[in-house]
Image (cartoon, grey):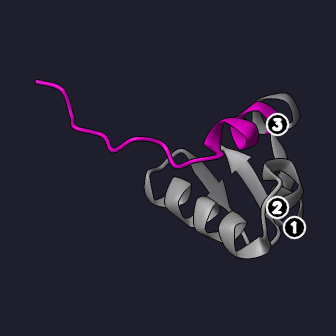
Amino acid sequence: MYLQQRPLPKHSEHLFKVLLIEGEIPRSKVKDIIGKEAKTASTLIRTLTEMDYIEFNSKKVQYV
């Protein structure tokens, strides 16, 4: 009846708060928003994109 969805990755809530307010942000700003290294930010962006929560092009991340 319900689709089984995996839990959101750690630090997602910080990114979602900013995206809801700003709509889109530079990809380079994600690490500052979540307070982690660039590798962690890239992993978060990739995971949320695969889960269809966000979209990104080479420079900007936006809420879907």
The magenta segment: 1-18
Distance from disc 2 to disc 1, alpha carbons, whole Å, reads 7 Å
Inspect the magenta stretch and tell me whether residue 8 lies in it.
yes
Q: CA distance from mark 3 to mark 1?
A: 14 Å
Amino acid type of the residue tagged 1 in the rendering: Ser
- How crowded is the residue under tag 2: few (<14 C-alpha within 10 Å), some, or many (20+)? some
Quadrant of the rendered structure where residue 12 is? top right
Query: In the image shown, does 47 or 60 lie closer to the viewer?
Result: 47
Badge 3 crowding class, 10 Å Cα cut-off, few under 14, some 14 to 19, many 20 or more, is: some
Q: Earlier in the sequence, mark 3 or mark 2?
A: 3
- Res. 31 mark: 2
Q: Which residue is mark 3?
A: 18
Q: Give the amino acid type for the residue marked by disc 2 in the picture.
A: Lys
Query: Could you tell me what secondary structure mostly forms the magenta stretch?
Result: loop
- Asked if disc 2 and disc 1 are in contact, CB closer than 8 Å, the reply is yes
Tell me the SS state at disc 1: helix
Which residue is located at x 65 percent, y 46 percent?
A: 11
Q: Which residue shows up at 40% across the image and 41% down it?
A: 7
Looking at the image, is mark 3 or mark 1 earlier in the sequence? 3
Q: Which mark is residue 28?
A: 1
| Residue 45 falls left or right of residue 51 | right
| Mark sitting on residue 16 | none
